[in-house]
Image: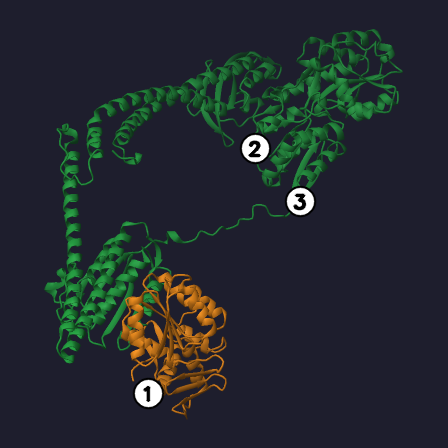
Amino acid sequence: MTDLPRHSLQRRLLLSMAAGFAVLLILISLLLWTYARSAANRTHDLLLAGAALSILERVSVGPDGATVDMPYSALEILSLNPVDRVQYRVFVPGKAEITGSEDLPFPTNGELAAEPAFYDSDYRGAAFRFVLQGRRLNAPTGAEWVAVQVGQTVEQRASQQWSFFLSGLSGLGALSLIGLGFVWVAIRTSLSPLRQIAGDLRLRAPNDLSPVKGAPPREIRGLFDAINGFITRLDQSRTLTETFIADVAHQTRTSLSAVQGHLALAVDAQDFDGMRARVERAERQADRTVRLTNQLLANAMVIHRSDHASMHPVALKSLVRDTLAESLRDSRMRKIALSLDDEGITPGRDLIQADELSIREALRNLIENAVRHGPPNNTVTITLDEADEKLRLSVDDAGPGIAESDMMQATERFTSLSDKTKGSGLGLSIVKAVAEGHDAELLLRRSSLGGLNVTMIFKRLMASFLLILGLGVAGSKAQAQTLRIYSATDTVAMQPLIDAFIDSAPGTEVEYVEFQTIDLYHRILESDPDDMPDVVISSAMDLQVDLVNRGLAQHVFVPVDVRPPDWAVWRSELFGFTFEPTAVVYDRRAISADELSANHRDLATFVRNNETRLRGRIGSYDLRQSGVGYLYASQDSLQGPQSQRLIEVLGRAGLRTYCCTSKMVEAVAQGDLAFAVNTIGSYASTLAEGIPHVGLHFFEDYNLVMTRTAFVPASARNPVLAAGFVTFLLSDRGQHAIAQRTPLIPIRLEGAIDTKIERLTREKRSTFLPIKLTPALLTFLDALKKQDFLSVWDTSLASLP
Amino acid sequence: MRILLVEDNDELAETIVDRLRAEGHSVDREGDGNEANELLRHVTFDIVLLDVNLPGRNGYDVLRSLRARSDQTPVIILTARSQIDDRVLGLDAGADDYMIKPVDFRELSARCRVLARRRSGSASNVFTVGALNFDRAAKRATIHGQDAQLRAREVQLLEIMIDNLGRMLTKEEVADRLYTFEETPSMNAVEQLVTRLRKKLEGTHLVIKTARGLGYMAYVSDDD
């Protein structure tokens, strides 16, 4: 039928069917959404319930009332969900807080019971899902309830809900598509009569304008009739055109015959005066023929151009001015008082969609009419004004005008109302054709000047042609940006990295502030949101996880190809960028490599057997002073009872504690220590360089691996630059810089870089046990848990025989 | 007057030649663009009537090479095309006037007369229209040999109008050319000035026509 798909009937039917399916899909998806939510809730509630149970299990009654020993497994269970932040609280309702965040929201209508109660609530600006579960304990003061409340943000739940929802929906979608396919087939079949009509029309000779024959089905009867109606009208229109051509032929031939006649008579004239009179009439007739021909051509041109896409935005005001100035050149205009009134139009608001040539022709014809039909000193006034969204162009003259009764007729072709002036009868019909071609209204009235008023009313073009100027927002001001980094890493280690970053981002300034891990943690906790640094870097993974768990960090989109391994990323907010195994640093003069044991258990045995020799000559971190030391010790404690035994043995052998790896290496180098455990291997390796009697030792069972982490605070002032810095740390350039210019080991590019520590650690890679960045690290930050852990530690150290 | 008609249609050419000769002009006719060009190199005419569609070289090219030789002979373009581009092209190429075929002979001879009256030789710096004589260098106008007694502003206006013969100038354009930035031109003053000058030019063939809302146009009338 038609080659324009947007007019396709088939498509329209399909679209309405598709709309129906869509409504159905929306209804079903509402149900699906609710279902997906409860399914996602069930899954996550299980985790919460598990965590709550494992905490409740460790609730006991101590001398001071109820207490809890936070199990590592509780938060580890919650870490099965790799995304969400966690909160917990253990308390005796109405009496005492035991541990955790005291301000967690209580369910609005909840009663504490032994059964877990789940509810959604907002906590510190984030949506959380909580579980509340209680346990009755028999305390010396009588039975009392201890409540455990565990909460987790709902990001993972929401994404799971989406994925349930989407997978359900995609099945339904596929089903709908298949349904639509059937609809399509049905539509095609039922539309086949239309194709028959199309075939009939296509095979027709161009001059065959007889109606289409056939018995169409009821549904397309209307269309069928319309086509036949159109064919009839086309036939009429063709007849009209034929009439026009016949008219034109008649008019020109008549006109030319008259010229010819007068000239023939002139030739035959007997006397000179008679001949002269004939010739003068022939000349006047020739004049009219010329004008007729001109106007016929103008008429044809105007009609032709209205069929074609010659329309474009035209400023009417200047077009009218030009045309008038142009027509004034005619010597017949010398006595005519021509004036233009365009004061009623605001400059720039005179745009219409028009064909200049046609408008010019129409205006010229109107003026010529006034000149031709009026007195030699006629007054012609052209007025341009605007009304609402229309532009009015009117021509008034003081000539004889047209009687009201003739006005309708005046615009018809070949209707000249005046015999005296012998117009061609085409002038106004040209104007009419132009008006029609421009979708303009044409009005003929009596003018206030006494003659005729012809008004064309055009639709004004809207301001859509205003130029939208590029505002040139200066997104890349050359102004220097300052990146503020708070870091618990020696400036010496970081300086080369920062230099490399500035090289890759010229115009950047970096303000680097160095802290101890615990100081940094407190500084960030206490900082005003307006006073946050742009990047926070620390080796204390647990403290960093805690800060991020409090919602203080923002997402950083790191390209997939530079993402660190999964264990070193949490929530796309916290990124580990180094690989730092613990190592034993020893003095070769005091102890031989062979004596150092292959695993932790043997080390405990070795120390106990050589207690006198090693007394006061073993070093490790001071857990109260060093965040990394505490992290190492607490992670060691998870590896089994041998770690507790090792601490006791080391304590009995007079373990000496230090703030940092550098002091331990120094003590070993000076011979104060025989060896130091849990030093940061990469640092130690660099510090021991050039001191031949200081060696590094790794265990065969496991060696903890820490990673230095970075995050961008939520209220960072230069988040884009900060994200750029984090990405740089992980990029190939950044990682190479870490390997070659700092004492640290890069987390990516394993084996691709050849450095001393890299060689040293390469064959041990399988024994390395990375500490994972998960909320489970929060277990040992629990105030009660930490207190317990440190008191056990103190006891061990004090257990000198 | 010595007129060159460049027209390739013999019938039309003949009628024009006869008409102009009947008016007492001496008329040469050329039918080929190249030959017309050659002729114009060596012979000086008072007016050239130039058809656009010519064998050899079209009318615009002939006109352009004429003007390129700094020949200021008045040229009227004759064209059968009514499209506006032709007009602009013709006037830009340096034509003094143009007419659309079929040409009304009375109009044609009137325009020839106008051009003939307007002997604005750039060499002489003197503009003459019938009885009116304007010396650009001396800034002096005479009518029938008598000083027209124009004031400085009127002389300025006269010069502007002569420079733009047959062209519509808006009131603002006139004011712009008359006054400097420091002077605040009032449109009333322009109107009064035009009225005064028009009065003083009465009886000459230079007419300043006012079209309200459009501006002023000076033309040379051919009424005798």
Q: Which chain is green?
A: A
- Tell me the residue that label 3 is attached to: A507
The residue lying at 42 percent from left, 17 percent from top is: A39
The residue lying at 15 percent from left, 27 percent from top is: A217
Closer to us: A677 or A799: A677
Colour applied to chain B: orange
Which badge, 3 or 2, is on the more N-terminal residue?
3
Q: CA distance from mark 2 to mark 1?
A: 91 Å
The x and y percentages for residue A427 are 21, 63
The answer to whether B172 appears left or right of A747 in the picture is: left
- Is residue A790 something that shows in the picture? no
**SS category of the residue bearing label 1:** loop
The answer to whether A369 appears left or right of A121 in the picture is: left
Q: Chain of mark 3?
A: A
**What's the residue type where badge 2 is placed?**
Gln
The answer to whether A537 appears left or right of A382 in the picture is: right
**What's the residue type where badge 1 is placed?**
Gly
The x and y percentages for residue A231 are 16, 40
Closer to us: B67 or A1: B67
The x and y percentages for residue A472 are 53, 50
Disc 2 and disc 1 on one polypeptide chain: no
- Tell me the residue that label 1 is attached to: B203
Q: Which mark is residue A554?
A: 2
Residue sticking out furthest to the bottom: B146
Residue A281 sits in which quadrant?
A: bottom left
Q: Are marks 2 and 1 in contact (CB under 8 Å)?
A: no
**SS category of the residue bearing label 2:** loop
Disc 1 packing (10 Å; few <14; some 14–19; many ≥20): few
Q: CA distance from mark 1 to mark 3?
A: 80 Å
